[in-house]
Structures are given as C-alpha cells and as structure tokens.
Amino acid sequence: MDTSQILADLHDQRDRIDQAIAAVVALDATAVTPAKTAAKAASPSPGPKPTDAAKRVVSPEACQRMAEAQQKPVKEASKA
C-alpha cells in the first residue's frame, strides 16, 4: 500500500467519525434523560399533613410507663 492510499483511507475514516460524532451530539442535545423524567414521576405531591393533635397521640403503654415513672421517688444526686 502506498502512502497516498493510506492517507485517503484515513481521511475517509475521519469523515465517518466526524459524522458519527455530529449525530451523537445532535441526539444528546434533544434527548430527555430518563433520570429527570423518572424523578418527576416518582415524587408525587405530599399528602395531607398531620394535625398537631395527631402528632401528640401517645400509646396506652407509653402512658402507663410515664405514670409508673412519676410514682417512683426521685433519687438525689450524690455530692462528690
């Protein structure tokens, strides 16, 4: 193979690579990434917020533990 033929082949390959790069850049500029659309679809609007009364609900077991704790005598701190 002579150098002129090698250069012609290299120029042809370069032209094909340039076309492929241009096509990928064009696709990338107009494409919508699935991560962005999935994030929007996966994050629904928040539901109703609990009221203050609902936040303060204490289970009966917790009420019993608190009552027992209040009935125990308080230990005095030892002075060192």
Image (cartoon, rainbow, N blue to C red):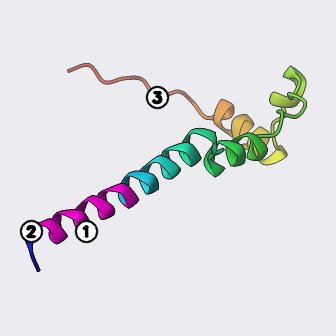
CA neighbours of label 2 inside 10 A, class few (<14), some (14 to 19), many (20+):
few
Q: CA distance from mark 1 to mark 3?
A: 93 Å
Disc 1 crowd, CA 10 A, few/some/many (<14, 14-19, 20+): few
Q: Is residue 75 left or right of residue 80?
A: right
Q: Nearer the viewer, residue 17 or 77?
A: 17
Q: Earlier in the sequence, mark 2 or mark 3?
A: 2
Residue at the location (39% across, 60% down)?
A: 16
Please give the residue where the numbered disc 3 appears in the rendered image: 75
The residue drawn where x is 63% and y is 45% is 31
- Element under disc 1: helix
Residue at 84% across / 33% down in the picture?
A: 45
Instruction: Give, as a three-letter code, the residue at label 1.
Output: Asp
Going by the image, does 17 lie left or right of 5?
right
The image quarter containing residue 50 is: top right
Question: Which residue type does callout 2 highlight?
Answer: Thr
Residue in the foreground of this view, choosing between 17 and 54: 17
Horizontal and vertical percent position of residue 74? 53, 27
Assign the C terminus to one quadrant of the image.
Answer: top left
Spatial CA distance of label 2 from label 3 is 98 Å
Mark 2 or 3: in front is 2
Which of discs 1 and 3 lies nearer the camera? The answer is 1
Dominant secondary-structure state across the stretch colored magenta: helix
Q: Nearer the viewer, residue 39 or 20?
A: 20
Instruction: Give the x, y percent position of residue 69.
Output: 64, 36
Q: Which residue is mark 1?
A: 9
User: Could you tell whether 41 is left or right of 11 in the image?
Assistant: right
Q: Which range of residues does the magenta coloring cover?
A: 4-16
Considering depth in this image, is 76 or 12 the residue closer to the camera?
Answer: 12
| Residue at mark 1 to residue at mark 2: CA–CA distance | 10 Å
Q: Residue at x 78, y 45 (%)?
A: 41
Name the image quarter holding residue 48: top right
Mark 2, residue position: 3
